[in-house]
Each structure stands twice: as structure tokens, then as C-alpha cells.
Image (tube, grey):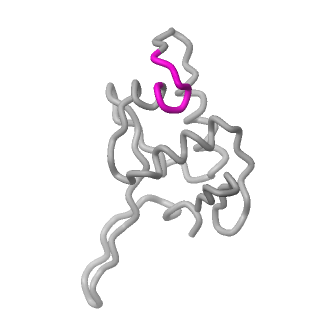
Amino acid sequence: MLNRASRRATVHGHEIPLTRKEYDLLALLAQSPGVVIRREQIISEVWRSNWEGTARTLEVHVASLRHKLAVPALIETVRGIGYRLAAPAAPTAPGAPESPRAPGGPVGG
């Protein structure tokens, strides 16, 4: 769960220490779960730049977030395009078969 006022992230009730950029990246992805956000847009909004250098800054930050959140499947890579936050599973009707969901559930659970 993200608390935008305090800029804190929690997973299963435990606060996760994030850097400023990690928090900004997670907050951007969390604005539209399930929607792919292009790499260029992420760099523009999180780093306030259109820099297209060869450094793998974005990939390093994504890897760090996956590690810290302990739910690697929560942030999905869309090859050649960008990233998306796994959409939470829709509730199922009683008696209906369960739909597959991201391991570990949503952030904050």
C-alpha cells in the first residue's frame, strides 16, 4: 500500500524503505495497475528527463523494487515497451473457479 502524503510503502503491514526514485517509480506504476507504461514515459516522469543514455538506471531501479517488495511478479516487464504493475485479481462470485493472480497479492495486503 502506498501512502502518498507520507511517501511510505507497506507490504503486509511492514514498511518498506524506498529511495525517492523507487517510490516515484512505484507510485507511477500504481496509478494505473495493469496498464503498460512506456519506458520513455517512466524516465520522463520519474527522472524528469528525456535522456536516452546507455545506463540501465530504470532496470536497476525495477530490480531493486522487486527485491524490496519481495513480490517480483508484482512489476511485470513488457518486453520492448515498458513495465506495468500487476492488476489485482478481481473478486470471484461464490462457487466460481478462482482466477489466476500475481503471487503474493497486491502491495499492502
User: Does the magenta segment cover residue 76?
Assistant: no
The residue that appears at 40% across and 29% down in the rendered structure is: 41
The furthest residue to the bottom: 94
Residue 13, given in percent of the width and then of the height, sits at 69, 69
Is residue 103 shown above or below 35? below
Magenta stretch in the rendered image: 44-50
Residue 77, given in percent of the width and then of the height, sits at 40, 37
* 19, 56: nearer the viewer: 19
The residue that appears at 50% across and 19% down in the rendered structure is: 49
Quadrant holding the C terminus: bottom right
Horizontal placement of 86 versus 3: left or right? left
Is residue 37 shown above or below 51? below
Q: Quadrant of residue 12?
A: bottom right
Quadrant holding the N terminus: bottom right
Horizontal placement of 8 versus 40: left or right? right
Number of numbered discs? 0
Is residue 40 shown above or below 95? above
The furthest residue to the front: 5
Residue 79, given in percent of the width and then of the height, sits at 34, 30
Q: Quadrant of residue 56?
A: top right
Residue 5, given in percent of the width and then of the height, sits at 65, 57
Is residue 24 shown above or below 59? below
The furthest residue to the top: 54
The residue that appears at 31% across and 75% down in the rendered structure is: 98
The residue that appears at 53% across and 47% down in the rendered structure is: 27
User: Does the magenta segment cover residue 46?
Assistant: yes
* 79, 22: nearer the viewer: 22
